[in-house]
Image (cartoon, grey):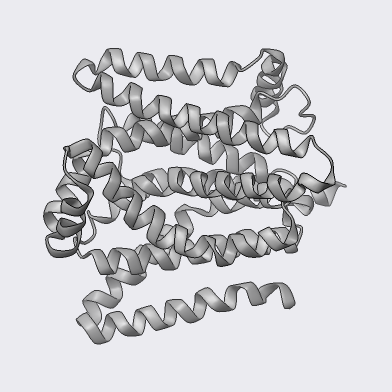
Amino acid sequence: MPRMRVLIFPTVVALFACVAAYLWGGLNALFTVALLAVLETTLSFDNAVVNAKVLQRMEAVWQKRFLQWGIPVAVFGTRFVLPIFIVSFAAGLGPLVVLNLAIFDPLQYGHLLEGAHVAIASFGAAFLFLVSLKYFFNDRKTVHWIEVIEKYLSRWGGVEAIEVALTLIVLLVSALILPMEAATILVAGVIGVVLFIVIEGVAQAFEMQAGADIAKSSIALFVYLNVLDAAFSLDGVVGAFAVTSNLLMIIAGLGIGALYVRSATVYLVRAKTLESLPYLEHGAHWAIFGLAIAMLGSLFVRVPEPFTGFIGLVFIVLAYISSRREMRKA
């Protein structure tokens, strides 16, 4: 099973991290790291499916770099460095002050990170809304899973930038409902919208050019995948502080999960899973839409992280079952 080799490295890292956690903090630390790793892996599988579709458009060398270079970005960039800058912006503190809190006073850092939840949720919801809506508002899309809905949405795909308009309307309505947080919602949400438009536009522009620029397209897609990973993961970082305030355990647990998700992405590409399971991509985008709704809803009510992940998992499982049934008919 050569394709399974891609899972060897994250498994070795996971075992090493679990042993280190046990030696450092006993069974309690081991359980915490393992729990965070399992949650991150299972709740982010929809991310792996969508990433695999994008990864297919990249050069082989950039597919490898997604796994090799992307690991430090995913573990330390998205789950450690980026939240520090978000907290710094939201709390009006210097990044070095926030870094000092993250290392020496993780409990206080966790409270500050929770306080930045509005900005995190607005950015993530806007970006993920666009990822899912752009997929469904596609008038060239001919394969439909939930046909009664997807076929109708596909007809509207001819309207230019309809997904952007709907996302901005959602942000505006949310800002009107929460006037005290309106500025944060609009600024963070618009940043998510602009970032999606810029990265998607650059990638498509390069893909329209001839072979010499395929490498440039792969670079743009590499950046896009890491931003997508950030949008998926930021809310999970906040939720991890509900499990533990120990930053080392959070980085270890979420890092293991990130490794498995990226390895699963490469496996899906090499095994051509998306070709053999026609509705899996549909289920992943419905899962992303559900996550965007949950992140937006968390601005108004408390949405438990396991509930959010359960929604995505249900869509993935149902899409898998439907795909297998369709392949048997074929």
Q: Is residue 68 above or below residue 30?
A: above
Measuring from the top left, give residue 134's x and y in whole percent. Answer: 62, 28
Q: Residue at x 75, y 45 (%)?
A: 278
Measuring from the top left, give residue 132's x and y in whole percent. Answer: 57, 33
Side of 264 relative to 249 (left or right)? right
Measuring from the top left, give residue 112's x and y in whole percent. Answer: 17, 45
Any part of residue 174 in sight:
yes
Q: Is residue 267 above or below residue 172?
A: below
Side of 38 relative to 28 (left or right)? right
Measuring from the top left, give residue 258's x and y in whole percent. Answer: 47, 61
Instruction: Please state, as top left, top right, bottom left or bottom right, where the N terminus lies in the image.
Output: bottom right
Q: Is residue 13 above or below residue 298?
A: below
Side of 294 relative to 151 (left or right)? left
Any part of residue 321 in sight:
no
Q: Residue at x 65, y 20 (%)?
A: 153
Furthest residue toward front: 212
Which of the 4 image quadrants contains residue 272?
bottom right
Q: Residue at x 43, y 68 (%)?
A: 256
